[in-house]
Amino acid sequence: MTKLELSHVTIWLRSSRRPLINDLSLVVPSGEVTVIMGSSGIGKSTLLDFIGGHLDPAFTARGNVKIGEYDITHLAPEKRRIGIMFQDDLLFPHLSVGENLLFGLRSDLNKVAGRQALIEDALASADLAGFADRDPASLSGGQRARVTLLRSLLAKPQALLLDEPFARLDKHLRTDVRSFVFEHAIAEKLPVLLVTHDEVDAAAAGGKIIMLQESSI
Amino acid sequence: MDDPTKQSLERTLFAMISRTAIGLRSILALILTAAFFIPIVLGFWQTLLPSFGYIPAIGLTRIEVFAGQDLIAEPGFASSLRLTLVTGFASTALACILAFSFCAMIQNRIAKSATERFLAPFLATPHAAMAIGLAFLFAPSGFFSRLMSPWATGWQKPPDIITINDDWGVSLIIALIAKEVPFLLLVILSALNHISVHKFMATGHALGYGRAQIWIKIIIPQIYPLIRLSLYIVLAFSLSVVDMAIIIGPSNPPTLSVLSLQWFSDSDPLSLRLATATAIVQTLIILVAVTLWFAMERVVIVVGRWWIRKGGRGPVSDYLMRFLVTMVHVLLACSVLALISLVLWSVAWRWQFPDITPLSWSVQYWSYVLNSDQDILFNSIAIAACTSLICLSFAIAWLEWQNFETPSIRIIVFCIIILPLFIPQIAFLFGLHILFLRWGLSGSLIAVGWAHSLFVFPYIILTLSDSWRSLDNRYIRSAASLGANRMKILLRVKLPMLLRPLLISAAIGFSVSMGLYLPSLVMGEGRIPTITTEAVALASGADRRLQSVYALLQALFPMIIFFAALLIPRIIYVEHADLRGDRQ
């Protein structure tokens, strides 16, 4: 797998002259978790929006995002193959657990039985065997987080962005889910960028930690 | 402090207060039923009887079989039925698809408050005015024909071809879509407040899906339940519309509602049997149509889930949606051009074919209407202002009190409130008119205003209840914990915080009343002419300049009210950004 690289990223709110993110460069090697920390409102989620291609039109940005040697800065968001997990799990409530995974699974595998078998395997690997027909609403927070990660991975992303995905979980679940996410992402050799303001999360990531500061003019 | 007598006194007082509240609530329920439900039931009953041959006015006092056989025997009835179904279903389905596509494409690209401002003029323009304006565009002597003549077509005079009032109802379908798309856009935009669209879009993109696919597979399934009722209302409306069908619909044979109206106005009393039977058939059509639509939803869900499970990310939906959005742009451009051509005609003096602009100008028609038809303007404005304000007060009272009722009562009352939108107007207004005649109310402003409020009230409830429910409950609990009673909370917290939605729903009520044709026509007995009855009457061939003046007046007053509704919160709350409505 390949690294995720940001070079000289600067993001402004269109209406203000002061940049939210100022000339940020970093490299996330494959199979490593890099952490971005900073107080709320500092622009952590905006940075992830920029990388994923969902930047709100109220913002404007400069700089480049590369996956390996491939520049994806101007690519349509759906072409970037960058997975994302939010604080809210965002499992689609109108679909079953299995259908959520099938939605994520790439369409190259066309045979219905093959697709079904693939998601059953994925569920089993997360101790969720037999959950395919369940309504996402009937799952616990930890289970939902695991299904969300499986869904992201089934789309075969080239990098993973984590936007405080553990913030809503209870303390005892948090450790489990965190190691589940990190282990799977590292096993797939993905470069992972984690945004958090929890220091335990940051330490558990085991990678580089970058503190975002209020930028000056 | 812990004096037992004082405690029991407090308890008695509390019981008395809650009993008064129950008393007031029953009075409110009584008024709502008496004012909105009983007239419809009685009116419908009075329509049902003649359709079974019971017409005591001409000595027919025996109940016979339903006049269905006679209807089928009428030449053109089958075509009318087909036209009604085709125009109703096609316009609703297309409006729905176009509105969703447009929302999918503008979401996150245009601010919500800007979209509302941009939609206001389209929402404010009544159906009849829009139909007249579109007729001016598409008619053989209309704007588009002039634009192409004579250089491309060689026409020196208006060609003898049929464009508007075509036999297939295409022009009626276009006109209906032009009016319903802005309404559905507003409904969809407010439904979007209930889910975090941005994050679902990001999640969908992250899994490799394009904008159109995410909307079809993820966003629409989640918001559809919230807009379903509005779609059914649009469907029922399109299947029974009268004024638009008269102006721009097919004429020989016309749609069922126009056919029914023609029979009602026939001097032969036996025609009443056919007229009422047609109205009953229309009621059944709406019932069947809504059921059918519901069944179609089930099919779409099954097919859709199968499609979602396949996991395809193809770009076809994006191309298709971009094409549909272009159609919406064309449609909106036509609506704007329609309004512009109304303005041009209203100040034209001589305007020959194929000139694109008038040869000479005059404000004579404006000054004529404003000077000699003031009573018509007064009727319209007075009825619209009174009904929207009275209905708004009733709506506030009901929304405030409904929380004390059990859910089943709330649902029953809600069904009663929206009932008039699901029964063809023609199926209870004539019956109601007969009753009003007996009670000596007919042909009065009160009778017309009452009939208007049957339609204004449900629209106000529909537009207001969402904002009312969304008001954060914690504000009310905080106010209560600070010692405020319910009345004080209502007057000092809820109403001020909801000023903007209150004004907007009042403006919608105003424009609904301004645009109502049949209620004014039937209940006013020709003695209460309104801008709309005049506009529709003039549309059948009279002077275009006079038509435009009336069509513009019809649109002008609702637009003023709409812009006032958007502007007032900005002035009052100039220092309270959360209540101005210019953010988000």
Image (cartoon, rainbow, N blue to C red):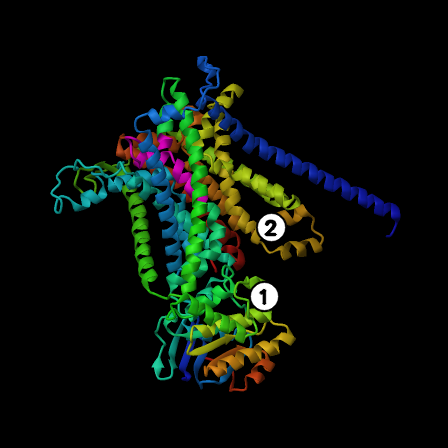
Q: Measuring 45% from the left and 44% from the top, which residue is drawn there?
A: B232
- For the residue pair B412 and B114, the one nearer the viewer reads as B412
What residue span does the magenta drawing correspond to?
B231-258
Q: CA distance from mark 2 to mark 1?
A: 37 Å
Q: Measuring 65% from the left and 43% from the top, which residue is drawn there?
A: B405
Quarter of the figure with residue A15? bottom left
- For the residue pair B368 and A72, the one nearer the viewer reads as A72
Q: Secondary structure at mark 1?
A: loop
The picture places residue B79, in percent across and down from the top left corner, at 31, 33
Q: Is residue B139 shown in magenta? A: no
The picture places residue B440, in percent across and down from the top left corner, at 52, 20
Around disc 1, counting alpha carbons within 10 Å, would you say few (fewer than 14), some (14 to 19), or many (20 or more)? some
Q: Are marks 2 and 1 in contact (CB under 8 Å)?
A: no
Around disc 2, counting alpha carbons within 10 Å, would you say few (fewer than 14), some (14 to 19), or many (20 or more)? some
User: Can residue B396 be seen by looking at this rendering?
Assistant: yes
Q: Secondary structure at mark 2?
A: helix
Residue that numbered label 2 is attached to: B494
- For the residue pair A36 and A118, the one nearer the viewer reads as A118
Q: What is the three-letter code of the residue carrying label 2?
A: Lys
Q: Measuring 56% from the left and 41% from the top, which residue is drawn there?
A: B414
Q: What is the three-letter code of the residue carrying label 1?
A: Leu
Residue that numbered label 1 is attached to: A139
